[in-house]
Image (tube, rainbow, N blue to C red):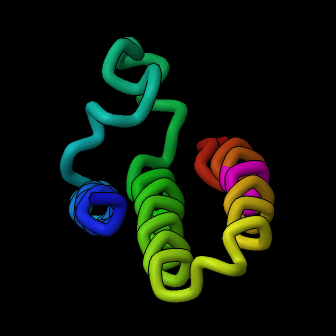
Amino acid sequence: MDSIVNIFVILIFLTIGIQIFRGKWLFLIAGFNMSSTKEKSKVNIPIMSKIIGSFCLTIAALELVGFIFPDINTIITSIIFISLILTIIFTNVLAKKD
């Protein structure tokens, strides 16, 4: 049963990551859908979608590695946490328009 859940999570993150990376499904990014047009004009949307999409694809890849090698789940959790922090920093720095 756990393997079915893991595969399902991997497929969800893979699908979401690909779609956000392509610039689609941006409504899944928290707060972006509710932003005004003025606030959205301050954001470089293609760069933001690439960063967030890459993060989702990274999560899918790490989940796959954790599924194949279950002994290193602690390391994978640490990598996910670090990549989350880096994604937040990169998005705030790189996706802002001047």
Could you tell me which residue is drawn at 79 percent across and 59 percent down? 82
Could you tell me which residue is drawn at 78 percent across and 72 percent down? 75
Could you tell me which residue is drawn at 69 percent across and 52 percent down? 84
Could you tell me which residue is drawn at 27 percent across and 59 percent down? 1
Image spot of residue 89 (x, y percent):
77, 49
Image spot of residue 35 (x, y percent):
41, 16
Query: Where's the C terminus, which quadrant?
Result: top right
Q: Which corner quadrant of the image does residue 11 belong to?
A: bottom left
Q: Which corner quadrant of the image does residue 66 belong to?
A: bottom right
**In this rendering, would 47 be left or right of 27?**
right
The secondary structure that dominates the magenta segment is helix
Q: Judge whether residue 18 is colored magenta.
A: no
How many labels sit on residues?
Answer: 0
Give the vertical position of 2 relative to 92 (above or below): below
The boundaries of the magenta stretch are 83-87
Image spot of residue 50 (x, y percent):
44, 64
Q: Nearer the viewer, residue 38 or 81?
A: 81
Image spot of residue 21 (x, y percent):
33, 64
